[in-house]
Amino acid sequence: SFRNHMTEVFNRNGLEVVKLLDAAARSGEVVDLQAIFFRFTLDSVGEISFGSNINSLKDPSVPFSNAFDHAQAVAEKRFWDPLWKIKRAFNMGGEKALKASVKIMNDFSADI
């Protein structure tokens, strides 16, 4: 069932988070919990929604993960920037990089 699938995905990815935190605790490494929880959510929802694990917990440099994070940041800035439509029209600032991020996400989605 869908519920069992979700439970399996969240449990499996939760174990990956535990491994990351355990390794950091053993080495004394400082970790960014927000980034780890973002990657946990992205991997879990990606697998449940797309049927494909993004694997950002194992490899934080996965292009989809970085593109998604950047796209969210640009979307948030639009709330505070009254000139964002002009920047988009002239392909300026974060709007220029947003196009590249959207392309990465679209290419990933099209390959599934």
Image (cartoon, grey):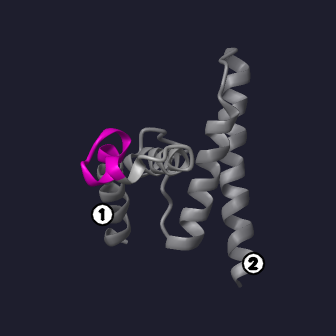
Residue depicted at 63% across the width and 50% down the height: 40
Q: Position of residue 16 (x, y in %)?
A: 65, 45
Secondary structure at numbered mark 2: helix
Taking the magenta stretch, the answer to whether it contains residue 87 is yes
Q: Which residues are magenta?
A: 86-97
Label 2, label 1: how far apart the Cα atoms are: 29 Å
Quadrant of the snapshot with the N terminus: bottom right
Seen from the viewer's position, the closer of residues 66 and 12 is: 66
Badge 2 amino acid:
Arg
Seen from the viewer's position, the closer of residues 20 and 73 is: 73
The majority secondary structure of the magenta stretch comes to: helix
Residue denoted by label 2: 3
Compare marks 2 and 1 and give the one earlier in the sequence: 2
Taking the magenta stretch, the answer to whether it contains residue 89 is yes
Q: Position of residue 57 (x, y in %)?
A: 56, 44
Quadrant of the snapshot with the C terminus: bottom left
Q: Position of residue 49 (x, y in %)?
A: 56, 72
